[in-house]
Amino acid sequence: MDAIIHHPIIGPILATLVTIGVVLLVVAYLTLVERKVLADFQVRLGPMRTGPHGLLQPIADALKLLIKEDIIPTEADKAIFWLAPVISTFTGLTAFAVIPFSKYLYLADVNVGLLVISAMSAVGILGIILGGWASNSHYPLLGALRSAAQLVSYEVALSFALLSGVMVAGTLSMQGIIQAQQARGIWFIFSNYGFMIVPFVVYIIAGTAETNRAPFDLPEAESELVGGFHTEYSGFRWSLYFLAEYTNILVISSVAVTLFWGGWLRPFPSVSWLAALNYIVPLLVFAGSGLSSLTLVRKMKDPLQQKVLVAVALLLVLIGAVYMIPAFNAAASGIFWFVFKVSAIVYLMIWFRGTFPRFRYDQLMNVGWKVMIPVGMAAIVINALLGLV
């Protein structure tokens, strides 16, 4: 037993399983956050009935999808039909293997980490294409063809944006990129006299298109293609596609934070007297959220839901208080800053969905080939010149 426990492969396997479990839970509640945010944009309440303020809605959705009937079309290629959503989900989860969540928390730090993420993103496209083709139906096939054209087009612009960041960092290692920002005392978004904001904007737009999010959700345009590439999918296999989509949102946001916004670094990492931000901001975020939640208790009529909401509020206040302990803060402040920045970018992508109407297909291609790619190429040249100054 000791030989098994101390085997060098056991630690990475356990860390991988824990990471996958945490990502799945985060993705489940990201769907609730998105529904709540969009409801707020539209002056609605969103999910409210399953648990206090709908907090248990993701659990109910997961159980429903697990027990829902799984239908495979008679004329479908069953092996590829089964494999396609697995490919999309696997590639999305694999990218987390090289993403550093803090100075101490990461699965692997390889010298080509950014290249690994780009490769997984490119392979993930195959899951959508194969799913549409294997369904042996017109609408899924059209959605798959749209997806192939869209993702390949915006992959080019996204690569140009990443290349601008890599030129400034001088490394493809994800930890190395953050350490380069720490050594220079500045986030790369402000490098080259602030011109790095141009590749960041290109990256966010191309990343939104890469994840099939509105206003670039042409591969699954329900007003035109029923459900697009996943029209024939149901139950658990359908949920795998959406698990892959929301996982890719987290990956895109994590890479943006790492490459442009300092990763797990606090604001102004080179200014020593601002180290108090590691204590003040977590306390304000967690304790403020908890205390504000207590104001909602009186509006709830069910005593059980009141107790659950009070427990959640007290838990948030407790987390804020724990961050005031120096030893814990030194270990966990990086995780807080990373999650805080990723949450801001995820909120921005949700904001896009609630604000912009879907593009026509010709508009989608025009933005990709006539705007994003030329701007991305120009950003590389200009940032290269500014880097020499």
Image (cartoon, helix red, strand yellow):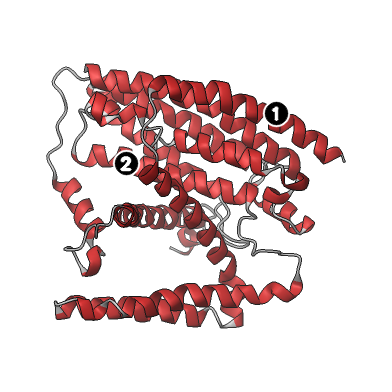
Taking the view exactly as shown, the residue that stands out farthest to the right is 389
Task: Say if 69 sits above or below 78 in the image.
Answer: below
- Residue at which label 2 appears: 242
Q: As shown in the figure, which amino acid type bears the numbered disc 1?
A: Ala
Residue at 25 percent of width and 37 percent of height: 237
269 displayed left or right of 317? right
Residue at 69 percent of width and 37 percent of height: 164
Q: Nearer the viewer, residue 7 or 72?
A: 72
- Residue at which label 1 appears: 378
142 displayed left or right of 258? left
85 displayed left or right of 263? left
Q: Nearer the viewer, residue 7 or 340?
A: 340
Q: Nearer the viewer, mark 1 or mark 2?
A: 1
Task: Say if 271 sits above or below 346 in the image.
Answer: below
Label 2 crowding class (10 Å Cα cut-off): few <14, some 14-19, many 20+?
some
Residue 312 falls in image quadrant: bottom left
- Considering the image in quadrants, where does the C terminus appear? top right
Q: Nearer the viewer, residue 273 or 360?
A: 360
- Considering the image in quadrants, where does the N terminus appear? bottom left
